[in-house]
Amino acid sequence: MPSINLLPWREVRRKDRQKTFNLRLLLAAIVGVVVLLGMWGLISDAVSNQQARNSYLQAQVAQMDKQIAEIKDLQQTRARLLARMQIIEQLQQSRPTEVHLFDQLVRTLPPGVYLTQVTQNGDKLQLQGVAESSARVSTYLRNIDNSLWMGDPNLEVVQKDPRVDFGVRAQQFNITAKIIDKADAAQNKRNGR
């Protein structure tokens, strides 16, 4: 006779499959959580590494900013020192020029011409004075032009001076001239500079 299994084998199989499914689902969930925790750990490590790099770079940038500020201060100090050195060099170079200039002012002055005011602005001279006649002013202009330390005379004003009692022909004059070193210019020209 044939045997008939009346046990609920389908339900047992269904329960086994449900157990296997739940077990696999649990296993997948555990693996998913482990993977997520691993990824979170890797990402947090990467973020902390990047933050450490950023803080290092910010510290280096701050240090470089300080160095740039120090360099700017040094450049400004250097520029001030160079300006002072140039002023000192100009003073050293103009020291003999002033002596020669005063000497030439006396040597170029013809008799009958008197200076009332001498003004220097850079390399320009402003000469004001009184002369006995216009001819004496002309002689003075020629003397300035032939001087080794003055040149390019320009007569701006010649007029009768009522204050000075040289006689009827007393003239008040105003001359501009340049301070030059013709001897040095000639030497440079000979040397080919």
Image: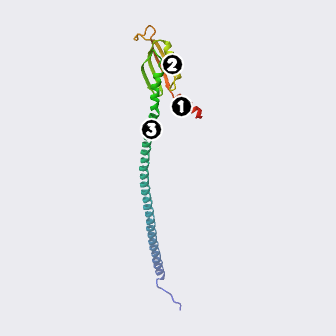
Q: From the viewer's side, name the closer residue of 10 and 23.
A: 23
Q: Which residue is mark 2?
A: 141
**Residue denoted by label 1:** 184
Is label 3 or label 2 in front? Answer: 2
Residue kind at label 2, given as amino acid type:
Leu
Q: Give the answer, above or below, for where 159 lies relative to 100.
A: above
Circle 3 SS class = helix
Residue located 51% across and 18% down the image? 141
Q: Amino acid at mark 3?
A: Ala
- Mark 3 or mark 1, which is nearer to you? 1
What is the basis of the colouring in this image?
rainbow
Q: Are marks 2 and 1 in contact (CB under 8 Å)?
A: no
Q: Quadrant of residue 53?
A: bottom left
Q: Amino acid at mark 1?
A: Asp
Q: Residue at x 47, y 34 (%)?
A: 93
Q: Could you tell which of marks 3 and 2 lies nearer the N-terminus? A: 3
Q: Secondary structure at mark 1?
A: helix
Going from the N terminus, do you reach mark 2 or mark 1 first? Answer: 2
x, y percent for residue 22: 45, 75
Label 3 and label 2: CA atoms lie apart by 37 Å
Give residue 46's position: percent from left, percent from top: 45, 62
Q: Is 89 in front, or is 38?
A: 89
Using the image, tell me which numbered label, if any, was put on residue 83: 3
CA separation in Å, label 2 and label 1: 22 Å
Name which quarter of the figure residue 127 lies in: top left
State whether residue 31 is above or below residue 152: below
Q: Quadrant of residue 162?
A: top left
